[in-house]
Image (cartoon, rainbow, N blue to C red):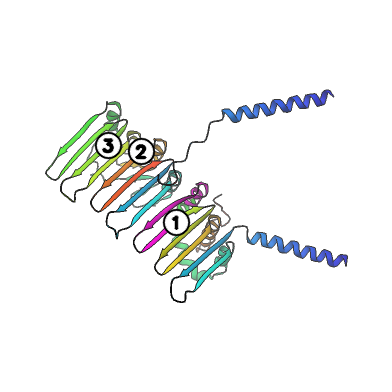
């Protein structure tokens, strides 16, 4: 019985540690509401760590072009993420007209994009750390890349 | 007993020293933000607001290497400055008293360039119902930083941005026209006031 208890405790501990690791980079929140007669509503909340993991699982030839294109912009992206990480919460861009409203903001360590028009209301929030990890994962897939995938802007 | 008294005295002295250091430590400078606001006069037109911490712009600019912009510096064509010695002109302006520098009166527009309170101020007034009114105010320290490179045909945008960060709250550009209003300014508020 003692042995079973130890096994159960170890298993639960491993599950808690795994959950903690999975949630370590926060969550990506995507909420799409379509304004129609029978509107589908899509709301996905997923651990942000899944994004760089998914990038590592995509075959090389599918990502090669995107990886090559992002390489020259890596220093700029990292500088932007680094600066935004230290910046206070603020609305970065806000565009509004008679038909559509778009807002890109930094809020609590996340980049939040809200779009509202006649047809849809979309809300996307992504932790800045997750964007950083995903960009590094994408850049490391470029053919002959010397980029250090473990680099963190922090 | 003596040891305990010594420890208490040393601890008290350390706490006092730390609190004194905290009181005399300089406060971190307030973060400054670049704001761009575009409002369309037409009811169907849109509004655009951009708010960017200057620190982010200062970090990003040196990393961009596109066209004439490299590492925060822009290389101009040889003909663009037409041999004008901008650093000398700016130095003379900086040391001169406030005054009107250039006044141009034409049939369809009036242009005034003046030095006021350490700023270069440009007013452009177009005549007619659809004429634009443009006001540009740039601190001389920013203009000085812009032309602080060793190469005559190069302007240092990164240095100008850094000088802008140190300048006070200021309206940089305002454009008033029949179709839109544009304002660009720097202050220490994250959102437009």
Residue placed most toward the observer, B80 or A25: A25
The correct choice, above or below, for A134 with respect to B109 in the image is below
Residue at the disc numbered 3: B121
Q: Is residue A99 magenta?
A: yes
Q: Is residue B155 magenta?
A: no
Disc 3, disc 1: CB below 8 Å?
no
Residue at the disc numbered 2: B170
| Residue at the outermost left position | B107
The correct choice, above or below, for B89 with respect to A32 in the image is above
- Say what secondary structure mark 2 lies in: strand
Which residue lies at the image location 35% right of the left edge and 64% below the top edge? Answer: A99
Binning the other alpha carbons within 10 Å of mark 2 as few (below 14), some (14 to 19) or many (20 upward) gives: some
Percent of width and height locating residue A113: 46, 59
Binning the other alpha carbons within 10 Å of mark 1 as few (below 14), some (14 to 19) or many (20 upward) gives: some
Q: Chain of mark 3?
A: B
Which residue lies at the image location 47% right of the left edge and 40% below the top edge? Answer: B31
Magenta residues span A79-102
- Say what secondary structure mark 1 lies in: strand
| 3 and 1 marks on the same chain | no
Residue placed most toward the observer, A26 or B60: A26
Does residue A45 appear left or right of residue A90 in this picture?
right
Residue at the disc numbered 1: A104
Disc 2, disc 1: CB below 8 Å?
no
The correct choice, above or below, for B142 with respect to B192 in the image is above
The N terminus of chain A lies in which quarter of the figure?
bottom right
Q: Chain of mark 1?
A: A
Q: Chain of mark 2?
A: B
């Amino acid at each position: 019985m003692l042995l079973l208890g130890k096994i159960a405790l170890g298993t639960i501990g491993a599950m808690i540690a795994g959950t903690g690791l999975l949630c370590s980079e926060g969550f990506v929140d995507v909420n799409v509401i379509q304004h129609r007669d029978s509107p589908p509503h899509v709301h996905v909340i997923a651990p942000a760590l899944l994004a760089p993991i998914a990038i590592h699982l995509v075959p090389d030839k599918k990502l090669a072009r995107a990886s090559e294109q992002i390489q020259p912009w890596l220093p700029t992206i990292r500088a932007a993420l680094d600066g935004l990480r230290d910046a206070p919460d603020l609305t970065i861009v806000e565009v509004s007209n008679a038909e559509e409203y778009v807002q890109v903001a930094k809020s609590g360590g996340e980049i939040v994009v809200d779009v509202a028009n006649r047809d849809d209301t979309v809300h996307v929030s992504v932790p800045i750390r997750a964007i950083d990890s995903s960009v590094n994962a994408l850049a490391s897939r470029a053919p002959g890349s010397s980029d250090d995938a473990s680099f963190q802007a922090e | 007993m003596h040891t305990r008294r010594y420890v208490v005295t040393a601890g008290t002295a350390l706490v006092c020293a730390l609190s004194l250091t905290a009181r005399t430590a300089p406060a971190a400078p307030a973060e400054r933000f670049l704001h761009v606001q575009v409002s369309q006069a037409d009811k169907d037109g849109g509004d655009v607001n951009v708010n960017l911490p200057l620190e982010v712009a200062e970090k990003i600019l040196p990393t961009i290497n596109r066209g004439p912009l490299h590492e925060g510096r822009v290389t101009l064509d040889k003909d663009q400055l037409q041999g004008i010695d901008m650093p000398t002109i700016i130095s003379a302006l900086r040391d001169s008293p406030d005054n009107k520098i250039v006044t141009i009166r034409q049939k369809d527009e009036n242009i005034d360039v003046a030095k006021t309170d350490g700023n270069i101020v440009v007013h452009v007034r177009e005549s007619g119902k659809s004429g634009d009114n443009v006001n540009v105010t740039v601190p001389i320290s920013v203009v000085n930083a812009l032309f602080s490179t060793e190469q005559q045909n190069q302007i240092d945008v990164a240095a100008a941005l850094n000088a802008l960060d140190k300048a006070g709250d200021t309206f940089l550009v305002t454009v008033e026209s029949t179709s839109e209003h544009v304002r660009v300014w720097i202050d220490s508020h994250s959102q437009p006031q």
